[in-house]
Image: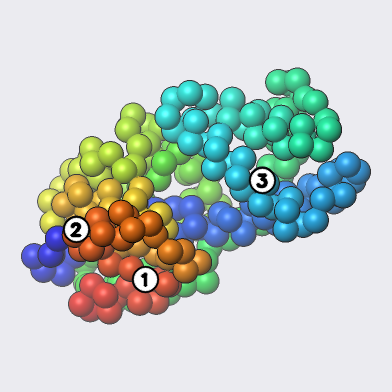
Amino acid sequence: MTRESAPRVVLFDLDDTLFAHRAAVSAGIQRYADQLGEPYGTMAAVDLTALWHDLEEEHYHSYLAGRLDFEGQRQARARDFASRHGVELSDTEASAWFADYFEHYVAAWSLHDDALPCLDALDAAFPGVRFGLITNGDLAFQRRKVEAVGLDSRMEHLIASGEVGVAKPDSRIFEYACSVFGARPAEAVYVGDRLRTDAIGAARAGLTGVWLNRRGDVPTADDAAEAAEVGVIELSGLAGLVGALGG
């Protein structure tokens, strides 16, 4: 996929693209486990964090697929985490457990260091460029994060799968976002940290797809071949975005 000219619209994923979600999750669960003490405090920090990330990946995708509602995936994560430590929770107890964890997660909310400098550089390189977000998740929850870290002043629109009814990588959510801006897909760029969900999905919808590979992940052979086929741009950080887009 080749852009026709300088981008009119640059769209971003939120979590782990602009918003430092993974770091906040790690800090939140470690602080909460420390507060709870035994039996949670007996697991090594690296294993504790890995378990919580794995459960988030499993149950949040069940929510995106419609198998759990938003509160249900939170309860499932709390129940499974507690169960691994020999603690059984009812639904009510799981909701309360997650709410307590969530306070520690919120306390660690921040943007990646390269987020705002990237937006400033795009503004300078492409005068008049417009910014927006496409995120898989609940609109109210994602808006809360956007406002908490001050991104609401920079983003014209927040497009959330929970509101639109389809999730990335479905082409319809990318097409819908472009229509909100009154732009054609060929005039838009999408930047996200997941190769297939974000970059390949966007490129298949006609946008320029950019994979922000902060952790140096190695894609599968199939994903790498498809990414090359649709012209996905791979970056290790947002500092390289302007140059990659020809600015």
Packing grade of label 2 (10 A; few <14, some 14-19, many >=20) is many
Q: Position of residue 126 (x, y in %)?
A: 22, 72
The amino acid type found where label 3 is placed reads Trp
Check whether the beta carbons of the residues at disc 2 and disc 1 lie within 8 A of each other: no
Residue visible at 71% across and 20% down? Answer: 91
Quarter of the image where one finds residue 136: top left
Please tell me in which quadrant of the rendered image residue 243 appears. bottom left
Residue hosting label 1: 235
User: Pointer 2: what residue?
Assistant: 230
Viewer-closest of 216 and 170: 216
Circle on res. 119? none
Spatial CA span between label 1 and label 3: 27 Å
Question: What is the x, y in percent for residue 186?
Answer: 13, 56
| Residue that carries the numbered disc 3 in the rendered image | 52
Identify the residue at horizontal 23%, vertical 72% (top origin). Answer: 245
- The answer to whether 138 appears left or right of 8 in the picture is right
Residue located farthest toward the right when viewing the structure as drawn: 38
Secondary structure state at the residue bearing disc 2: helix
Dot 2 or dot 1: first in sequence order is 2
Inspect this view and state whether residue 132 appears: no
